[in-house]
Amino acid sequence: MDFKQLNYFVAVAQELSFSRAAIKLHMSQPPLSQQIKLLEEDLGVLLFNRTRRSVELTHAGTLFYERAINILEDYATAKELCSWTSDGRAGKLRIAFTGSVPVFEEFPRLIQGFCNAYPLVEMDLKHLSTGEQLQALNNNKIDIGFLRPSLNFRPPPSIDARDLWHDELVLAVAKNHRSADINGKVQLSDMAQEKFILFPQALGCGLFEHITSITAKAGFAPRIIQEVSENSTTLALVAAGLGISIVPSTYADTKPPGVEFKRIDHPEVQSKIILASSRNRTMASLKLFLDYALAF
C-alpha cells in the first residue's frame, strides 16, 4: 500500500463511482480499478461492493475510509511542515545567554515576539557564561549565543558576532558606604583598598575580564573576598556591607534596598551584549532568528 493507492481509494469512496473517480484523478478507469484491487488484496478485505449499477463501501471500507482520510491529512501536514523547515518557519533553535541578558527588557520581548511570529520554531534556552557559549558554539552544542565579552574580545573566524545591546559598568556600594553620597562619577582608583564581590573567573566570564582590565588601568587588582555566580546574590551581599562590586547598569531596576549604583569615571566602562552564531551553521530558522533580532 502507498499514498497513491490511498488517494485512489478515497476518490472512489467519495464519488462511489470508478468512472467519476477516474475523471477526478485524470486517469483511465482500468488502472484505477486495478490499483483498488491490489489494495484490497494487500488488506485482505473487500472495500467496495460492486454491481453494474452501483458502487458501495463495505463495512471494512467505511472504517478504512475514516482512517485513510486521517492518514492523508497527517501526511499533508507533515509534508507542509517539512517544506517550512526550508524557509525557517519550523525547526528548533538552541539559545544560550549570560546571566545579565534576561535583565535587558528587550530580551523577553525579543523571544516572545519571535515565538509569536514563528510558533513552529521550538526554542531551547539555557544559561551559560560567555566562555561556555563560545565553546558550545564551536562544538555545535548551541545555535545562538547572547554574550557579554571582555574589552579585548575578538571573535574567532568560526564565529559570527554582532553588537546587539549596550549598557555600562557601575560601582555597587551599600547605602552607608563612603562613596554612596558622592555626586557625579567616582574614581575607580579610590576603590583600590576595598573588598570586592565578583563573578568567578573560572566561569569564562567576559564581565570578570572587563572589570579586572579597567581596575588594572586604574592601578590596582581588586581584592576579591567573595566569588558569586549571580548578580542578584552579589547585590544582596553588597547591601549587607560585606564588600563592593562592579556590575552592569542594567541591574539598576532590580537592585535590592540598601544598594546604591555610582557611575565610574573611566573611558572603558561601556559594556555590550553580542549576538553570536557559528558560521558553519546554515539552518534557515537560524538566519530567520538572526535577521529578526538585528531588526528588533
Image (spheres, grey):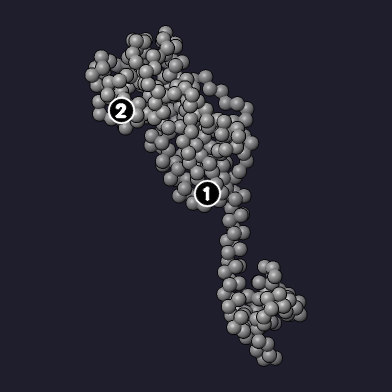
* Image x and y of residue 218, in percent: 41, 10
Secondary structure under badge 2? helix
Q: Which quadrant holds residue 229? A: top left
Q: Which residue is mark 1?
A: 121
* Image x and y of residue 180, in percent: 26, 18
Image quadrant where one finds the N terminus: bottom right
Position above or below: 77 against 294: below
Q: Inspect the image, locate mark 1, and give the three-letter code of the amino acid beneath it.
A: Val
Give how far apart the Cα atoms at labels 2 and 1 are.
Answer: 38 Å
Say whether residue 147 is left or right of residue 265.
right
Say whether residue 233 is left or right of residue 159.
left
Q: Which quadrant holds residue 168? A: top left
Position above or below: 218 against 173: above
Which numbered marker is on residue 236?
A: 2
- Which residue is painted at 65% across and 83% down in the image? 48
Q: Nearer the viewer, mark 2 or mark 1?
A: 2
Q: Quick check: can you spot residue 99?
A: yes
Which numbered marker is on residue 24?
A: none
Q: Inspect the image, locate mark 2, and give the three-letter code of the amino acid beneath it.
A: Ala
- Which residue is painted at 32% across and 16% down in the image? 185
- Which residue is painted at 69% across and 68% down in the image? 2
Q: Which quadrant holds residue 211? A: top left
How many tags in the picture?
2
User: Who comes first in sequence, dot 2 or dot 1?
Assistant: 1
Q: Quick check: can you spot residue 28?
A: no
Secondary structure under badge 1? strand
- Which residue is painted at 69% across and 78% down in the image? 44
* Image x and y of residue 253, in percent: 31, 32
Say whether residue 144 is left or right of residue 103.
right
Do callouts 2 and 1 mark residues in contact (Cβ within 8 Å)? no
Crowd tier of the residue under label 2, counting other residues whose Cα lies within 10 Å: few below 14, some 14–19, many 20 or above:
some
